[in-house]
Amino acid sequence: MSTLRRAIGLPQATALVVGTIIGASIFVQPSEITARVPSVPGVLVVWLAAGALTLIGALVCAELASIFPRTGGVYVYLREAFGPPLGFLWGWAMFWSMHSGIIAAIAVVFARYAGYVLPMGPAGSKALAIALILALSAVNYLGVRLGSNLQALFTLGKLVAIGLIVALGLLLGGRVDAHFVGAATAVTDLTLAGFLAALAAGLFAFGGWHMVTYSAEETVEPRTTIPRALLLGTVIVTVAYIAMNAVYLYILPLDTVAASSRVAADFADRLLGFGGGAMMAAIVMFSTFGALAGIILAGPRVYLAMAQDGLSFPWLGGIHPRFRTPHRAILLQAAWSSVLVATGTFRVLFTRVVYTEWIFFGLMTIGLFLLRRRPGLARDYSVWGYPVLPALFVVAAFAVVAHQVIASPGETLSGLGLVVAGLPVYWLWTRRGAK
């Protein structure tokens, strides 16, 4: 029987954390935060808070990964703490909306920015997005080493690009009289609702930090490698995000950042003159390509674990005899993500379900408290600041979800309904298997 190949070391695992987090958000939509927290210090505090919460969540995952170094990551942790139904719901939501939806969304962003270089209509943009999904799925089909090395290469490239953007902003800022031009007009009437909305947007930009746990059985010494990768990766991303936002606000007026839907391009145009936006479009394409490579790599490992646990079709648990990858799960993910691109339905599915992800993260952290009481579980890493920091993460996770329900009740509750719809499917599936 074929088994997965351990080929992901600490550099590749760290790159997977960094690369899956840094996609298009930091280049496109810091306006979501700036519009809700209209002051330079406030914006930077929100990004720091989002990074700190992400780090706490990553450390929770790190302890759980050291206890259960198995393929499937979050799915395994939820199943072990609460039982198979909750693990099934995580995988159900991942496949139909959360994970496949983000693959489709990032591929579409790549195709839209490619339009700066090769103008194309809506049909051509969709075709390019689907071609990208299929191409990166093919790379991951051929082996985890190839897929993880490609992703690591692009992650290194995007970090170099971010470093150059920050350096250019600081060096050339004097040409545009940059001196934190929004600071003098900073608005101080920050509300709790505004802060929570901004924090939710920041946490969305940090999304993907947990995906490195999915491939534990392909990671070298996962009990130590995954915790280190989570710690290093989230710190690197937090520093990069704060530096990027600081340089945006150094160059652009606060109201311009708040109103822009492509702040990185506006930043480049102001700094380098007309045409800077085209250069930034190439950087966004490079970044989204690298993020998509990591996200496509991660997801099929969850579907593989579900199939091996009897919670999905047995054939989905197959491992390729030569490439030693979950080849059928990769193909199924590619097919459904391509359907979401072709139909455009990923917008509705993804935006309605993305916040429910934080319900699962909150439950996962509660699960850590429960598992700490279970005898006989060995761990190579323990969360720093336990129980205070994990408890803070639980409160923050549910506060973000509660705010979203209050702000957009119809959209959020319908997304939650889509997730809960997996319960009767689970019941029918397990009842069928019991016969």
Image (spheres, rainbow, N blue to C red):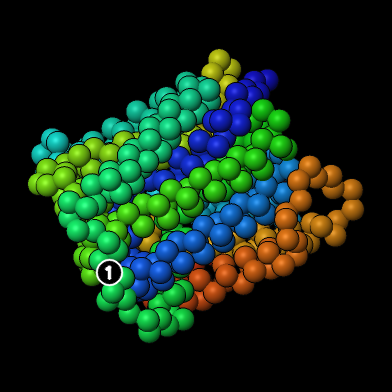
Q: Nearer the viewer, residue 188 or 348?
A: 188
Left or right: where does residue 13 sit relative to residue 332?
right
Pointer 1: residues within 10 angstroms few (<14), some, or many (20+)? many
| Residue at the farthest top position | 322
Q: Tell me residue 285's x, y (percent).
A: 28, 39
- Pick the quarter of the image with the N terminus: top right
Q: Tell me residue 220's x, y (percent).
A: 67, 28
Q: Is residue 338 visible?
A: no
Q: Tell me residue 72's x, y (percent).
A: 62, 42
Left or right: where does residue 244 sit relative to residue 173?
right
Residue at 65% over, 63% down: 363
Q: Amino acid at mark 1?
A: Gly
Q: Tell me residue 265's x, y (percent).
A: 21, 50
Residue at 43% over, 32% down: 156
Tell me the quarter of the picture where residue 44 sits.
bottom left
Tell me the quarter of the picture where residue 168 sits.
top left
- Callout 1 secondary element: loop
Residue at 46% over, 67% down: 45
Residue 190 position (above or below residue 85): below
Residue 253 position (above or below residue 239): below
Q: Nearer the viewer, residue 422 or 116?
A: 116
Residue 105 position (above or below residue 185): above
- How many discs mark residues in the rendered view? 1
Residue at 36% over, 42% down: 162
Q: Nearer the viewer, residue 168 or 333?
A: 168
Q: Is residue 230 visible?
A: yes
**Would you name the residue on which mark 1 appears?**
182
